[in-house]
Image (cartoon, helix red, strand yellow):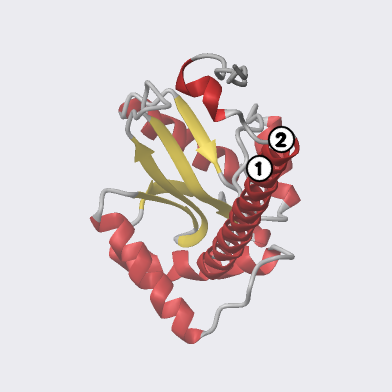
Amino acid sequence: MRTVLDIHPACEADLPAVAALAVSARDDSPTGAQLGAQELDRLLEHLSVLLAAGGHVLVAKLDDQVVGVVLGRVVAAYLFAERASLYLDMLYVAPQARRHGVGHALLRAAADLAAAHDCHDIYSAPVPGNRGVQRFLARLGFAPAAGHRVASVAALQRRLAAEATARDGAHGRRFARGGIEDLIARRRRARSVMESGPIDMRAVGGGAPSRRHPAKAG
């Protein structure tokens, strides 16, 4: 019996299976955190919001079972990009369905979606540490783009506060050093005036001092 592969946009009924695949994708990553039941419920909520906000969830089904998924968003042109692009937040195929063309079929559907929205590029963010997906994308021509850098909000706030404190301290030291140097300069000027001797104010009053001749007797 021939296996039938079907690629189509996900509906609400597909979301639990999509969430389960997302959990598997996290488990495949050496840096992925394990998801509990509460996090899984939150993931389902996020998927519903993604669909409601115009996001795209494409699923691959083999014999009516969801075995692969693409999560994507169309990013409109902005300051640093003149054309729209399709951003793939997730591309994942269940281990038992690999090497059956599922990944290629999902990317074909993603490329058609991008073309329909006049997108110029497709960006993909594989799950960190999943080298299999990275090699798969590289074989299909995906090249490295500008890498992301990440910092937690709390860590960034602590670092900014520490640098601001250090900067203010350095400014205070420069100000104190400038005040001391100014005081030394003023003392040097005062000392040079004292060492030059008193000023003859008669010269200021109008010429050389007059001489008095003694009176002659007789």
How many residues crowd around disc 2 within 10 Å: few (fewer than 14), some, or many (20 or more)?
few
Q: Which corner quadrant holds the C terminus?
A: top right
Image: 66 above or below 177: below
Residue drawn at the location 26% of the way across and 48% of the way down: 54
Q: Nearer the viewer, residue 147 or 208?
A: 208
> Which residue is identified by label 1?
190
Q: How many marks?
A: 2
Find residue 73 and report its image quarter.
top left
Residue that lies at the very extreme toward the front in this rendered image: 218
In the rendered structure, which amino acid carries the disc numbered 1? Ala
Horizontal arrangement in the rendering, residue 157 relative to residue 30 (left or right): left
Residue drawn at the location 69% of the way across and 64% of the way down: 28
Horizontal arrangement in the rendering, residue 59 relative to residue 179 (left or right): left
For discs 2 and 1, the disc positioned in front in the rendered view = 2
Give the label on residue 197, or none. 2
Horizontal arrangement in the rendering, residue 79 relative to residue 38 (left or right): left
- Local secondary structure at mark 2: loop
At which x and y percent is residue 167?
60, 55
At which x and y percent is residue 173?
65, 56
User: CB of mark 2 within 8 Å of CB of mark 1?
Assistant: no
At which x and y percent is residue 78?
34, 30
Find residue 120 and report its image quarter.
top left
In the rendered structure, which amino acid carries the disc numbered 2? Gly
Inter-mark Cα distance, 2 to 1: 12 Å
Residue drawn at the location 58% of the way across and 54% of the way down: 92
Q: Nearer the viewer, residue 179 or 204?
A: 204
Residue drawn at the location 75% of the way across and 38% of the way down: 195
At which x and y percent is residue 210?
55, 18
Q: Is residue 174 visible?
A: yes
Find residue 36 and report its image quarter.
bottom right
Q: Is residue 4 visible?
A: no
